[in-house]
């Protein structure tokens, strides 16, 4: 506790906050906005969200709900109609027949991850995850008094965990393993057979596998397979944010093992009562054929954007040993230019007007040698970014 002085009240900051880091990307974005306010045009390849608007049928369904319904609390695990749509989605998309009771609608996949950790972790319990990986995962675990154990991964495993790495890093305190396929920041997938091996290893050790499938739908030339196709004892996390282009609506979901449902429900009831009713009403239109046609068109454009940027970055001298097959990120080794990717990103922003994310945002392992490019932008914008980088790097 900081002692009060005459002019201020006592301030109590939880000890756990010392272990929760800032998102450097956000500081970079703030500076990018400042530069834009000064009249500079910034090519923004930092933010991890689609450039496309929410599909019109979803927006219309939201507006319709606002006009014609009372907007109320919904059941904590989501409205029955949306859970029904999700149930149908798993059947048609993956051939998986789930009971609705195992589907929980959440506030983005962030909400799902927080509930998962809240339901599973006792103080000091360990969760294994890849480094590099989505930074908030460490912090969800820490916020719920667990301990995130990051496992360095490299190009040889497609920047993903393997059953072998899980086995090597398991301790008596390990309770869960988290993977994301496709991954942020690398855009790489875990092939289905390797995912099954990881699941088997986690199961043998008496833990739980959490699979973040938030970038499902955004794969290029590969099908997205859900872990639910072969297991019903996993936590599968998903969201309307990315494929469905609904980041700001803050809606996601998860599919959880039956034994956890009542515990997760109790947490959801207490932590936030329910998710946004409007967002849920809008999302009911997410699975209709008109919307899916728009989303598939978007996916085609994402693929074109990747297909432009990947060779262009390699041509500039960035080393990208594994082709990103999904999401909308390229994780590039920049050691030809710097060992300090953090300083590099700031310099590139100030001098070239291009915003990219430093490796440090995604972990510690070889972070200084890597940057992440987020490419959901029209190809001409990406071309301008590459032109500026070429000039800056003098290549
Ligand atoms: C891998 C991964 N998981 C979860 C999230 C959280 O997304 P949301 O809460 O918008 O669903 C993100 C966001 O970028 C992500 O990249």
Image (spheres, rainbow, N blue to C red):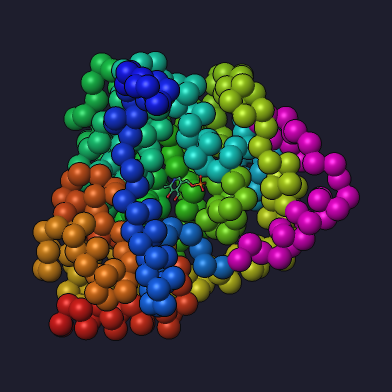
Residue 331 vertical placement versus 115 (above, below):
below
- State yes or no: residue 80 in magenta: yes
Q: Give the quarter of the figure containing the C terminus.
A: bottom left
Left or right of residue 103: residue 192: left
Asked if one can make out residue 278 in the rendered structure from this viewpoint, the answer is yes
Q: Is residue 324 magenta?
A: no
Give the quadrant of the N terminus: top left
Seen in the picture, residue 318 relative to 7 is either above or below; the reply is below
* Residue 253 percent coordinates (x, y): 58, 40
Q: Is residue 194 left or right of residue 346?
A: right
**Looking at the image, which is closer to me, 235 or 17?**
17
Q: How many marks?
A: 0
Give the quarter of the image for residue 140: top left
Q: Position of residue 218 (x, y in %)?
A: 48, 60
Identity of the residue drawn at 66% across and 28% down = 273
In this rendering, the answer to whether 67 lies above or below 55 is above
Image side of residue 100 versus residue 233, left or right: right
Residue at 20% over, 44% down? 364
The answer to whether any part of residue 326 appears in the image is no
> What's the residue at 38%, 53% (across, down)?
26
Above-or-below relation of 114 to 3: below
Give the residue furthest to the front: 6
Residue depicted at x 71% and y 58% = 58
Q: Classify residue 190 as left or right of residue 169.
A: right
Q: Position of residue 114 (x, y in %)?
A: 48, 31
Residue 194: horizontal and vertical position, in percent?
33, 44
Say which quarter of the image contains residue 374.
bottom left
Report the front residue among 62 and 94: 62
Q: Magenta residues?
A: 53-82
The front one of 84 and 5 is: 5
């Amino acid at each position: 506790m900081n002692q009060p002085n005459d002019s201020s009240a006592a301030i109590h900051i939880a000890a756990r906050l010392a272990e929760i880091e800032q998102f450097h990307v956000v500081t970079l974005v703030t500076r990018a906005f400042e530069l834009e306010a000064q009249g500079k045009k910034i090519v923004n390849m930092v933010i991890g969200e689609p450039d496309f608007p929410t599909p019109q049928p979803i927006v219309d369904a939201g507006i319709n709900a606002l006009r014609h319904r009372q907007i109320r609390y919904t059941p904590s695990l989501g409205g029955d109609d949306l859970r029904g749509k999700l149930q149908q989605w798993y059947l048609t998309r993956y051939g998986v027949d789930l009971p609705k009771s195992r589907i929980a609608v959440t506030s983005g996949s962030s909400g799902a991850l927080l509930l998962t950790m809240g339901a599973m972790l006792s103080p000091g319990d360990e969760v294994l995850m890849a480094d590099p990986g989505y930074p908030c995962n460490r912090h969800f675990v820490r916020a719920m008094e667990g301990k995130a154990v990051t496992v360095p991964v490299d190009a040889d495993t497609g920047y993903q965990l393997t059953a072998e790495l899980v086995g090597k890093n398991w301790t008596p305190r390990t309770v869960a393993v988290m993977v994301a396929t496709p991954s942020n920041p690398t855009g790489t997938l875990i092939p289905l057979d390797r995912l099954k091996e990881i699941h088997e290893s986690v199961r043998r050790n008496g833990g739980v596998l959490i699979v973040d499938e938030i970038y499902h739908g955004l794969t290029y030339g590969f099908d997205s397979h859900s872990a639910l196709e072969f297991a019903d004892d996993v936590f599968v996390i998903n969201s309307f944010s990315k494929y469905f282009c609904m980041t700001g609506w803050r809606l996601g979901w998860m599919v959880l093992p039956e034994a956890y449902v009542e515990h997760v429900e109790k947490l959801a009831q207490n932590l936030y009562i329910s998710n946004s009713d409007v967002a849920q009403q809008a999302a009911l239109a997410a699975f209709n054929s008109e919307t899916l046609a728009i989303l598939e068109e978007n996916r085609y454009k994402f693929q074109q954007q990747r297909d432009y940027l990947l060779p262009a970055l390699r041509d500039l001298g960035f080393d990208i040993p594994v082709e990103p097959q999904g999401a909308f990120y390229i994780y590039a080794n920049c050691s030809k230019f710097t060992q300090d990717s953090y300083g590099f990103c700031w310099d590139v922003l100030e001098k070239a007007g291009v915003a990219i994310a430093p490796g440090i945002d995604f972990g510690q392992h070889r972070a200084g040698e890597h940057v992440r490019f987020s490419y959901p932008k029209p190809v001409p914008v990406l071309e301008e970014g590459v032109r500026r980088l070429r000039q800056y790097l003098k290549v």
